[in-house]
Image (cartoon, rainbow, N blue to C red):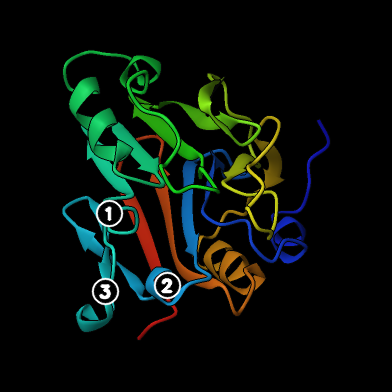
């Protein structure tokens, strides 16, 4: 698979929806995790990321304007020991709770499927990073309708047991804008990373569509000892 520029991938897609990027810095010292949300409706755009413990949650920027919170208020990032979980919905909690009971990442998602937001049936995308004693691996998942048919849920899992320096994988909910929104297709896209978290944060944020972007989370985890740095950017301030 040809590596693509994450900046170019974002710039050419006005509405990838929500996206997860997991990978490794070029110098090989840090695990990379990024998650962004976008919105077309006023309800979706009325959000910010806020820190919650070692993770983050979404929150209404203006609570008086919050409409249906069911699919937009959730914890995208939670930490379970040496595992960092990143998802686009409340399946974060499902993964956290079931992996805490010794289930695997794949097993924890067997009871979940795409979102019930007809006619889009937004895919549930998820990722988990495992950093322990100087070793690092990650996995990603997408649960999606069968080409827009909600009668069937197609489940795809991708495991990266030996991440390569300077490489990341990018999975997002939509192929682009549309009505209904077309679900992501294929395996996660191979994209680039940089060593500096501030540079990567700026690169990602500036590459997202100005009208539709809402919030961005970036975390770099030291593979040697598990310590981390986090950056959060919110359009609403």
Location of residue 51 in the rendering, given as x and y in whole percent from the top left corner: 23, 62
Left of 48 or right of it: where is 166? right
Location of residue 6 in the rendering, given as x and y in whole percent from the top left corner: 70, 54
Q: Is label 3 or label 2 in front? A: 3
Location of residue 117 in the rendering, given as x and y in whole percent from the top left corner: 44, 48
Reply above or below: 46 against 190. below
Q: Tell me what residue is drawn at x 46 percent, y 53 percent.
A: 35
Callout 1 environment at 10 Å: few (<14), some (14 to 19), or many (20+)? few
Residue 147 picture quarter = top right
The C terminus, quarter of image: bottom left
Task: Give the alpha-carbon distance from disc 3 to disc 1, as whole Å.
Answer: 11 Å
| Residue 225 in sight from this viewpoint | no
Label 1 residue SS:
loop
| Residue 109 in sight from this viewpoint | yes
Left of 168 or right of it: where is 232? left
Task: Give the alpha-carbon distance from disc 3 to disc 2, as whole Å.
Answer: 20 Å
- In the picture of the structure, the residue carrying the numbered disc 2 is 233
- In the picture of the structure, the residue carrying the numbered disc 3 is 66
Whichever of labels 1 and 2 marks the residue nearer the N terminus, that label is 1
- In the picture of the structure, the residue carrying the numbered disc 1 is 70
Residue toward you, 35 or 28: 35
Residue pushed farthest right?
2
Q: Is label 1 or label 2 in front? A: 1
């Amino acid at each position: 698979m040809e590596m693509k520029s994450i900046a170019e991938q974002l710039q050419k897609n006005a509405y990838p929806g929500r996206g997860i990027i997991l990978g490794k810095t070029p110098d090989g010292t840090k695990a990379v995790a990024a998650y962004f949300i976008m919105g077309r409706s006023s309800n979706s755009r009325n959000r910010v990321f806020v820190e919650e413990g070692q993770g983050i949650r979404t929150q209404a920027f203006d609570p008086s304007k919050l409409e249906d919170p069911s699919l937009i208020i959730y914890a995208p990032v939670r930490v379970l020991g040496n595992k960092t979980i990143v998802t686009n919905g409340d399946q974060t909690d499902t993964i956290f709770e079931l992996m805490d009971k010794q289930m695997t990442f794949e097993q924890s998602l067997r009871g979940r499927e795409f979102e019930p937001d007809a006619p889009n049936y937004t895919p549930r995308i998820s990722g988990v990073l495992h950093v322990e004693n100087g070793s690092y691996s990650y996995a990603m998942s997408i649960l999606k309708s069968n080409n827009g048919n909600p009668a069937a849920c197609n489940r795809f899992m991708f495991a990266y047991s030996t991440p390569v320096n300077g490489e990341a994988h990018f999975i997002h909910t939509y192929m682009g804008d549309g009505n209904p929104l077309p679900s992501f297709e294929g395996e996660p896209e191979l994209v680039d990373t940089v060593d500096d978290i501030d540079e990567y944060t700026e690169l990602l944020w500036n590459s997202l569509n100005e009208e539709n972007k809402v919030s961005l989370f970036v975390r770099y985890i030291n593979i040697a000892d598990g310590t981390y740095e986090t950056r959060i950017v919110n359009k609403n301030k």
